[in-house]
Amino acid sequence: MRTAITDMIGCEYPIVAFSHCRDVVAAVTHAGGFGVLGVAGRLPEELDVELRWLDEHTGGRGYGVDALIPRKVEQVGASGGHVPEEHRRFVADLLARYDVPELPADEAERVRASAGRADAMVARASELWDVISEHPVTMFVSALGPPPADLVEKAHAKGVVVGGLAGAVQHAERQKAAGVDLVVAQGSEAGGHCGEIATMVLVPDVVDAMDGTPVLAAGGIATGRQMAAALSLGAAGVWTGSVWLTTQEAETHPVVKEKMLAASASDTVRSRSSTGKHARQLVSAWTREWEDPANPDPLGMPHHSELIAEAKARIGRGAHVRGSGSEQLVNYFVGQVVGRMRSVRPARRVLEEIVAEYADTVARIERINAG
Amino acid sequence: MRTAITDMIGCEYPIVAFSHCRDVVAAVTHAGGFGVLGVAGRLPEELDVELRWLDEHTGGRGYGVDALIPRKVEQVGASGGHVPEEHRRFVADLLARYDVPELPADEAERVRASAGRADAMVARASELWDVISEHPVTMFVSALGPPPADLVEKAHAKGVVVGGLAGAVQHAERQKAAGVDLVVAQGSEAGGHCGEIATMVLVPDVVDAMDGTPVLAAGGIATGRQMAAALSLGAAGVWTGSVWLTTQEAETHPVVKEKMLAASASDTVRSRSSTGKHARQLVSAWTREWEDPANPDPLGMPHHSELIAEAKARIGRGAHVRGSGSEQLVNYFVGQVVGRMRSVRPARRVLEEIVAEYADTVARIERINAG
């Protein structure tokens, strides 16, 4: 297969796999797709460890990195005192009602230290690019809005392709104005942060507005039929995420993995409850509690994450106990394709099945026209 | 082109056009597509007039009818006293705040009579099929849930194909159990009543669950690229609606038509404000007022329609005045594809453009695979 994307980033199939798990990134890249490691929240030295591992496990093929490199220090950072008492009380009460156990002292310390290092991360954000540039990264994706101008310049000087995400045409136009080489048009059915426009409508709208800049379709894509649909809509390839969460390689929380395997397309919700911004995720007691009009609304970003960081750690730790409140609360970001994630398989096999079904689909369409 | 649908309902292209406007139905049917007339709310003698006209204007080709034939008298009907005083006050206050003019006495009488005839319509519902069966209708679609068993039997005895709409796999399974011959899988991006699952995810899920029963894809389809995507997902054809609302033939309110031509994909909302059930429609002051948490929630169906029938008639009448409150309030059902509806064209030309772009898309996909 050959599209503007396969030529641009150098891969056999125009299938990009986003994952926070380096094993998934390596497996997909090895199998002819293109893995992108999500590394938001890592310090430069941590990022270097991850990328060194990838260098050793991708057999010399290029891979991608999706990172948060803020334009200014003010963009992100600890909120300090912006969390209302009402919200703190609600979260404390929620954890008590669901009988969520406390963290052991050392783990609690680690969670608090991690939340408290936001300022350090922002201060050292510019070092992230220096780390990335020492590795065979062939695509860089800016995780929060258009990338800063100096970063685009540095990336292009190294021959690195820059990508940006968009949930509406006007976002895509801002990304293009910032100098990105490709745009990921992400529909409302996608897992994680997403807008309100469905992939079926968003992709052709973005393709037409981009006037030649290649577009990857994201949201609702986990099979070869969906890949063929995305290419029909004018995308030069697909950006997948959810489908890798239940692969053998994925480090998804085991209880969340089970919930995903059992879920249908109706079991996700676009909710502000986990980051402060609308993000599609598994329905659980956590999303139901926050959606209840009797309870406070989620805060904005990043204050909401600060509010819930320790709660999420406690829930994750307690969820292993069958029948526990933590088990009811635990969830994670995932798109509506969760209904197709029915068994745990190696990432390579998932990729091969997408490719095989894609070929079958194209053959079927050819028969329709010959008929 | 040949799919399970073209064979089943007898048309050149697997493109079904749903419209309340007989001129659109005739134009599409004449041009090789398949028109379906939406006739919910018509009495048997009114339906007969519409179908007689269609018989004369479709050149002997079969067409479809989408009607509401309730299973039991209790299913629909006037609510009599179920509208809370708070809601009546809110609507009266809303009309006053937006300075919406009263109806002339005769029109007010007509609107009230129409609202009051719900009982008569239900009592005479069984006559609707008798009317339909006297015309060359080749497909009947049940507008509200699975069709009654006796109706399916009568339709099949006459060789009429029966279709049913579904917004989730379990709805499709209920339709199939009721004996329908095809299912319309309608995604969340569709205009009018819709569920929460996007077309990209819903269609393959329904296709797999139907095990051979043909599926039409609905929601997000207004172009040949979107049609090719729908067929890639496994649909045997497409069910379109919104795209016909701005055609030359459509009797859409002229101010609404202008709003649609100016709207983007971001200008629709899935709201209960116009029927009591979630239906996608143009954002307007009407949807914003009902979505405001300070105002009462919409009632259920059919009480909400009873509550707002006269208000909607007043708004439609007043909307012709530039700068009026009625102009701000007026809206109508439409899907996210509204952003692609940029000019008023004859329905035949819209169909021809879909077919031409479909052919271009298939050729482009073939080039990708040859590359």
Image (tube, coloured by chain):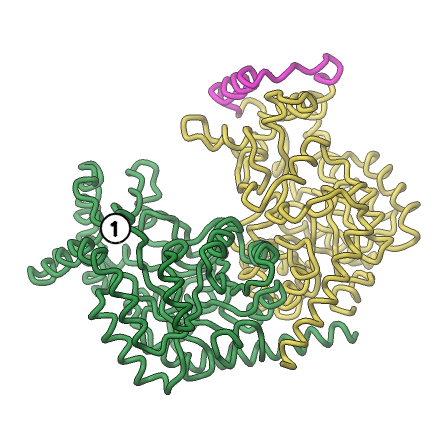
Chain colours: A yellow, B green
Q: Which x, y percent locates residue B360?
A: 62, 79
Residue annotated with mark 1? B73
The residue segment tinted magenta is A83-109
- Residue furthest to the left in view is B105
The answer to which image quadrant residue B67 occupies is bottom left
**Residue A92 colored in magenta in the image:** yes
Q: x, y (%) of residue B132?
A: 31, 71
- Identified at 70% across, 23% down, the residue is A320
Secondary structure that dominates the magenta span:
helix
Image check: B289 left or right of B163? left
Could you say where residue B170 lies in the image, as x and y percent from the top left? Answer: 51, 48
Residue B193: x and y in percent read 40, 54
Q: Nearer the viewer, residue B136 or A243?
A: B136
Q: Chain of mark 1?
A: B
Q: Which residue is depicted at the point 85% across and 55% down? A: A31
The residue nearer to you, when weighing B280 against B148, is: B148
